[in-house]
Image (cartoon, helix red, strand yellow):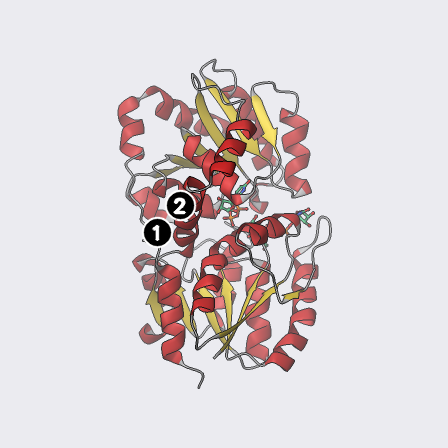
Amino acid sequence: MKVLTVFGTRPEAIKMAPVVAALRESASVSVRVCVTGQHRSMLDSVLRTFAIVPDDDLDVMSPDQSLSEVFARILARLDPILATWKPDFVLVQGDTVTSTAAALAAFYRRVRVGHVEAGLRTGDMNSPWPEEANRRLTAVVTDRHYAPTERARRALLAEGYPEDAIRVTGNTVIDALLRCTEANARDPALQSRLQMDFDWIDPHKRLILVTGHRRESFGGGFDNICKALATLARRPDVQIVYPVHLNPNVRGPVFGQLGNNESIRLIEPLDYPEFVALMSRADLILTDSGGIQEEAPALRKPVLVMRDTSERPEAIDVGVARLVGTDPAAIVAGVTDLLDDAGRYAAMANGATPYGDGRASARIVADLLECGSS
Ligand code: UD1
Ligand code: UDP
């Protein structure tokens, strides 16, 4: 069976890396890796971490790209690969432009589509934007829906997708996270590098790790997030570290408003092993990221989500994540509550991992093999 995996951004690469590894372990599968390059350096960093050398690189990224130009380039550059290699399946992940464009390109060539991380929904087309639309569009042309949770499966059933086309697999991000924490623990060179890279961490202070990049927060949302961080940074018992996403619409306001704040460490995006190590060192995580909402609970880190909605309500339901939105007062109140109330902190850091057991990739590959090459 010929399987073409297509991914292009940092989170897709992290979540597809264990799937690629599991596909390569199967003697009955011929696997080809196509990266779109929707992200360039952040994608390449993940490829290095997981030792993946792509067979095809569509190299579509341009500075401050528009959604449509990325979409159009992917369709045009992926089509010839589909036409000549003729895969039995195309595997896509998540809700980016890459995943939707690749799924559509496959559908137009009558190639079956497997969707990893299917069925996430907020019910609000504007939040997250444009991801809620992307994943719904992908579902329409998908043959095999790999739902990470039972709730995601129910969302797909409610939209009328057939029960026998859906498998609950867990989220492959937990496969990647476990692989990375095990590799980190076995790597003394990395340990000493981390010691040096993070020598600024003051063990007597509480460490808050921040990330943020959502398009629906560009403008006012990011101004508010920066205001909240500036207020929190005034606490003498707190240190804040923020690896800043490479999107210029994020870097402009963040460096502009927080660049001179000595209590906030703005750093470049970290390679995945370093970032996992930093999450493990943090006391709490403040983020709008999808993947980090899934990883933080597995690392027993309370996570406050700077968004109005989440398509990952499982962590909120079991009490390990909380939505705080982008209102500065609400962000400050959420963090203060956790820092000052040891009981509430302990309840949130209870280690519930609603997103999987580390075997999601194996389940996906088993299902693909069952579907066969017919
Ligand atoms: C994209 C995804 C979003 C995902 C996020 C993960 C869409 C619509 N958005 O958003 O769902 O959550 O990735 O991070 O698919 N850039 C670089 N180097 C990089 C990466 C980005 O310079 O390695 C800059 C470029 O100027 C690029 C811009 O960031 O044009 C935006 O990248 P893009 O992938 O379009 O959007 P993201 O906001 O990263
Ligand atoms: N991540 C990373 N380095 C960083 C910040 C994040 O490796 O500096 C990882 C993080 O652990 C998670 C993924 O990137 O697995 C999340 O990516 P992002 O927040 O960009 O996208 P989202 O998950 O929101 O789509």
Question: Label for residue 355?
Answer: 1
User: SS for tag 2?
Assistant: helix
The image quadrant where one finds the C terminus is bottom left
Closer to the camera in the image, 334 or 359: 359
- For the residues labelled 2 and 1, the Cα–Cα distance comes to 18 Å
Task: Please name whichever residue, 225 or 284, is drawn nearer the observer in this view of the structure.
Answer: 284
Q: Is mark 2 within 8 Å of ligand 2?
A: no
- Residue at the extreme top: 236
Q: Is residue 124 visible?
A: yes
Identify the residue shown where x is 65% and y is 42%: 246
Instruction: Decide which of 251, 67 is in the foreground and name it.
Output: 251
- Amino acid bearing label 1: Tyr
Q: Residues within 10 Å of mark 1 (few under 14, many from 20)?
A: many
Q: Position of residue 79 (x, y in %)?
A: 65, 75
Q: Is residue 286 visible?
A: no
Indicate which label's residue lies in the foreground, 2 or 1.
2
- Whether residue 206 is situated above or below residue 358 in the rendered picture: above
Q: Residue at image x 57%, y 39%?
A: 270
In the rendered image of this protein, does residue 207 appear above or below residue 298? above
Counting from the top left corner in percent of width and height, residue 187 is at: 46, 41
Residue 182, disc:
2
Q: Is residue 344 left or right of residue 25?
A: left
Q: Residue furthest bottom?
A: 374
